[in-house]
Image: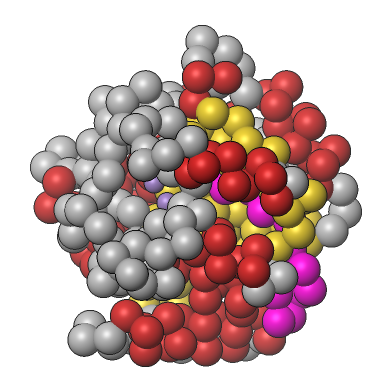
């Protein structure tokens, strides 16, 4: 193990239930200088349409993340042997203005990208994907998108508003942030307002994989196709925890039955290895609806898996 890189505080130095609950018990940094990747929280729930509570997501994900050890036993990834990683804390959103919050998120994440650091965002509701994509696009150019969700999040408006947690990917297409031909949505399901809810992305050129196409099977072959679709260009991964079945992840605002398993979630994230990932998020964890903490725990562990597939991670 190299000493040149930040290491999570070991459970043999401080019990895992003690100490400061930074993400994975990493050092906290005030800016991206010198970092290759960073966890950063966005405590936002102003964009939610049903149950709220995602403003508490980043803090609870950090609390549950204290369990995570630094080496990936399955994939042999050793992210802290080759990347400088820290916790950048939270972006100070404006709790009285969603519009201003979106601007603050874009500014905060743009600074991370411009510093040469890959942000791994702890959400927060899915509205944050829009400013996150704007910030990534400004540094890296038009993006491929891997979007894992029960919902397409391509509404034109919600309650008359163009910015909400169900609209970010419609805005991202309109603004040219993502390339529809290099965009895939996995896990869509449930009830909708009209067939157009899932047809619109297909009409734009997205690959849409409904949950029913995921049932009873490994998603490793799908991810092989996704990697071919994405090629060598920049890719953003946006992972809504409600893609998982509510039996696994009940602590979220808009749960839908018949969802993905945790095994399939691992196959999706691990299947992103080799892609030119420039940013990722894990959104929609709502601790008030998560009495066991398992939803936040799954979120924390998936964020670790995202770290393990970033470009430049050593596999030992
Ligand atoms: Mn979503
Ligand atoms: Mn969703």
Looking at the image, residue 278 sits to the left or right of residue 62; the answer is right
**What residue sits 43% from the left and 88% below the top?**
104
Residue 278 in view: no
Looking at the image, residue 48 sits to the left or right of residue 114; the answer is left
Q: Nearer the viewer, residue 222 or 97?
A: 97
- Structure colour scheme: secondary structure
Residue 194 in picture, x, y percent from top left = 42, 39
Quadrant containing the N terminus is: bottom right
State which region is magenta.
137-147
Q: Nearer the viewer, residue 148 or 47?
A: 47
Residue 203: image quadrant is: top right
Q: Is residue 129 above or below residue 68?
A: below
Q: Is residue 65 above or below residue 108?
A: above
Residue 151 in picture, x, y percent from top left = 43, 43
**What residue sits 65% from the left and 74% below the top?**
175
**What residue sits 78% from the left and 31% below the top?**
225
Q: Is residue 82 above or below residue 174?
A: above
Residue 10 in picture, x, y percent from top left = 40, 55
Residue 96 in picture, x, y percent from top left = 21, 86
Residue 55: image quadrant is: bottom left
Q: Is residue 60 magenta?
A: no
Residue 132 in view: yes
Looking at the image, residue 313 sits to the left or right of residue 39; the answer is right
């Amino acid at each position: 193990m190299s000493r040149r890189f930040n290491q999570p505080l070991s459970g043999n130095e401080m019990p895992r239930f003690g100490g400061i609950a930074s993400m994975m018990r990493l050092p906290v940094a005030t800016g991206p200088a010198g970092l290759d990747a960073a966890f950063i929280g966005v405590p936002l729930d102003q964009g939610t349409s049903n149950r709220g509570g995602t403003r508490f997501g980043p803090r609870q994900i950090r609390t549950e993340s204290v369990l995570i050890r630094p080496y990936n036993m399955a994939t042999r990834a050793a992210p802290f042997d080759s990347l400088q990683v820290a916790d950048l804390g939270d972006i100070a959103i404006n709790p009285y203005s969603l519009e201003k919050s979106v601007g603050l998120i874009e500014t905060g994440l743009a600074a991370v990208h411009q510093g040469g650091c890959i942000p791994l965002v702890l959400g927060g509701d899915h509205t944050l994907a829009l400013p996150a994509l704007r910030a990534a696009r400004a540094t890296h150019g038009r993006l491929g998108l891997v979007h894992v969700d029960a919902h397409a999040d391509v509404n034109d408006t919600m309650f008359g508003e163009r910015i909400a947690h169900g609209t970010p990917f419609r805005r991202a297409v309109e603004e040219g942030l993502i390339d529809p031909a290099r965009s895939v949505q996995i896990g869509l399901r449930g009830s909708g307002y009209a067939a157009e809810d899932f047809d619109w992305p297909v009409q734009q050129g997205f690959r849409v994989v409904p949950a029913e196409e995921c049932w009873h099977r490994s998603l490793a072959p799908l991810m092989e196709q996704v990697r071919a679709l994405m090629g060598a260009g920049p890719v953003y991964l946006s992972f809504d925890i409600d893609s998982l079945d509510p039996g696994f992840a009940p602590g979220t605002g808009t749960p839908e039955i018949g969802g993905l398993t945790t095994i399939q979630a691992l196959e999706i994230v691990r299947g992103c290895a080799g892609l030119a990932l420039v940013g990722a998020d894990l959104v929609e964890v709502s601790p008030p609806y998560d009495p066991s903490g398992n939803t936040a725990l799954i979120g924390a562990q998936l964020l670790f898996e995202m770290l393990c597939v970033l470009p430049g991670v050593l596999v030992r």
